[in-house]
């Protein structure tokens, strides 16, 4: 019996041992590793002075790798030639930086890796990691920080480059167009920035939505924000930078024939004072018309075709004057397309209109008929917009009413004499109870010219009021149920629109503020808000 007991004990030990051997290397669980890697040593040491090395070695307590290194790494001041950083694509406990540039004397450099260094197993980032050294006898320690935003829109851009250009004897404003900054950082996936290890001095601070990633201002593509006067360190520290797109200097692109009877003039900048004259001799029955392409920086020159192989134009604007010759080669001509985006629900604020792809040369209202639900004729008037691309049909309509609009052939005659086919539309107006009312008591103690806007947050539909009163009540009626924002524009030049800025002219964009409360409107609701302009400015 004793031998049997001993045998059983030995058997259980062997089974346990065998089981343990089978489980070796197969973990049963436990807490997930959430600890970020730690730098153990740096050669040369972190914040080394009198730096002369061409190679930097960083050693970590575990295997690490890179994620989005090219996107996240910021070297400040920037180097002309990129450094070689290894390993690439593999994990290692060691990161080596080989510098391929001649470093400036008495300068503090920062290699800011952002969140690009992660551990090999769980991907835990070594957040905002940077390596700093100085080629001089001390490490510069001044810094600035702040936030970025769009000067007009409520949405925020990320990956904003924030740049410091040293203002010294050689500084000119044009430096931001052709040279890299003295210091820089990037907001990455936030709207916040922080530039560290700056030396004492005077700087021009700008921010760029830098689409070309060249750390220089490209006005055609980039948004910019800037502080009007140079900042001085260590006196200043926090700055809010509001980005805007500049209006380009006027530039006319070479005109092209688009279709038979249509020449397009592409342009950049503003159109004011632009004049286009046709120099080519034309027949007696020739006619032409110029309008702007909707939502495009393009002018359309419409003309009645005649026998010629080219047209010559003289274009003038202020000091600009140039002749252009356009070869006529195409035989393609578009068909007339008449339509209306309004069909079905008809908002009380809307006006019914027909839109044409050709300029409208003539209207025949006798070929248009409007009837109500009782088939009674409804009186109306017609008019075109200045571009002659829309014909508006104005008529009085009742609440909760139904209307039928019949547009018979030849109601519209295009610039080329083409006419429409039969068109039919059915409209229905809503009742008062279908909409909401927004009442705003605006307190404006400084009597500033203001554009008060109610914006549907989903599609930027705008209802606006313009005021210069100290205090006044405003009412927005017939507002469709949805979520709305209130936008306040300080219209400094009183031209009833928001104006952007200019870096070279040191003009900031007009101030824009958003009321912090979203208005969630329902049918038959009345919502009242009191807005104190002084309080809004302080909040922003």
Image (cartoon, rainbow, N blue to C red):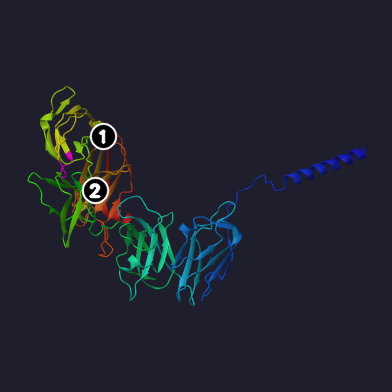
Q: Is mark 2 on a helix, strand or loop?
A: strand
Residue bearing mark 1: 435
- Residue 450: % across, % down: 22, 52
Residue bearing mark 2: 452
Horizontal side, residue 489 vs residue 234: left or right: left
Marks 2/1: CA distance?
A: 20 Å
Say which label, 2 or 1, has the lower sequence index: 1
Where is the C terminus found, in terms of image quarters? bottom left
Q: What residue sits 47% from the left and 61% below the top? A: 73
Crowding near the residue tagged with mark 2, few <14, some 14–19, many ≥20 C-alpha atoms within 10 Å: many
Where is the N terminus found, in terms of image quarters? top right
Residue nearest the viewer, comparing 159 with 233: 159
Q: What segment is highlighted magenta in the picture?
A: 384-390
Visible residue check, residue 170: yes
Q: In the rendered view, would you say 366 is above or below 477?
A: above
Q: Is mark 1 on a helix, strand or loop?
A: loop
Tell me where residue 331 sits by quadrant.
top left
- Residue 362: % across, % down: 11, 37
Residue nearest the viewer, comparing 535 with 67: 67
Q: In the rendered view, would you say 423 is above or below 115?
A: above
């Amino acid at each position: 019996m004793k031998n049997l007991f001993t045998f059983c004990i030995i058997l259980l030990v062997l089974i346990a041992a065998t089981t343990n051997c089978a489980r070796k290397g197969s973990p049963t669980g436990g807490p997930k590793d959430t600890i970020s890697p730690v730098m153990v040593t740096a050669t040369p040491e972190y914040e080394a002075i009198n730096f002369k090395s061409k190679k930097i070695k960083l050693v970590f307590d575990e295997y690490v790798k890179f994620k989005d290194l090219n996107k996240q790494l910021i070297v400040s001041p920037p180097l002309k030639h990129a450094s070689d950083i290894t390993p690439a694509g593999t994990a290692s406990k060691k990161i080596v930086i080989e510098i391929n540039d001649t470093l400036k004397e008495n300068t503090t450099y920062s290699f800011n890796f952002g969140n690009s260094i992660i551990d090999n197993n769980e991907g835990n980032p070594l957040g905002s990691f940077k390596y700093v050294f100085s080629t001089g006898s001390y490490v510069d320690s001044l810094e600035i920080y702040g936030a970025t935003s769009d000067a007009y829109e409520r949405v925020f851009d990320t990956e904003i480059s924030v740049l410091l250009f040293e203002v010294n004897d050689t500084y000119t404003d044009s430096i931001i167009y052709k040279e890299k900054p003295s210091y820089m950082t990037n907001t990455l996936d936030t709207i916040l920035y922080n530039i560290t290890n700056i030396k004492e001095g005077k700087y021009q601070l700008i921010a760029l939505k830098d689409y070309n990633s060249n750390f220089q201002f490209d006005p055609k593509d980039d948004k910019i924000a800037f502080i009007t006067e140079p900042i001085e360190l260590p006196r200043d520290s926090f700055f809010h930078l509001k980005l805007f797109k500049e209006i380009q200097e006027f530039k006319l692109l070479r005109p092209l024939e688009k279709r038979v009877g249509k020449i397009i003039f592409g342009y950049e900048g503003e159109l004011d004072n632009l004049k286009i004259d046709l120099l080519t001799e034309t027949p007696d029955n020739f006619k032409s018309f110029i309008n702007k392409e909707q939502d495009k920086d393009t002018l359309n020159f419409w003309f009645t075709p005649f026998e010629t192989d080219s047209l010559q134009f003289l274009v003038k604007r202020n000091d600009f004057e140039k002749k252009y010759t356009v070869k006529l080669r195409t035989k393609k001509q578009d068909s007339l397309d008449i339509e209306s985006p309004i069909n079905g629900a008809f908002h009380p604020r809307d006006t019914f209109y027909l839109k044409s792809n050709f300029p409208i040369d003539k209207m025949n209202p006798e070929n248009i008929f409007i009837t109500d639900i009782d088939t009674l004729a409804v009186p109306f008037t017609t008019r075109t917009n200045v571009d002659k691309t829309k014909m508006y049909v104005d008529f009085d309509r009742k609440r909760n009413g139904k209307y039928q609009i019949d547009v018979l052939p030849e109601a519209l005659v295009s610039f080329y004499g083409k006419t429409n086919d039969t068109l039919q539309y059915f409209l229905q107006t809503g009742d008062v109870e279908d909409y909401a009312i927004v009442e705003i008591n605006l307190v404006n103690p400084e009597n500033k010219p203001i554009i008060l806007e109610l914006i549907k947050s989903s599609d930027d539909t705008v209802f606006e009021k313009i005021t210069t009163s100290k205090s006044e009540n405003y009412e927005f009626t017939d507002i469709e149920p949805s979520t709305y924002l209130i936008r306040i524009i300080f219209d400094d030049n009183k031209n009833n629109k928001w104006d952007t800025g200019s870096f070279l002219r040191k003009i900031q964009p007009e101030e824009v503020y958003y009321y912090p409360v979203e208005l969630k409107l329902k049918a038959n609701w009345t919502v009242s808000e009191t807005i104190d302009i002084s309080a809004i400015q302080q909040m922003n």
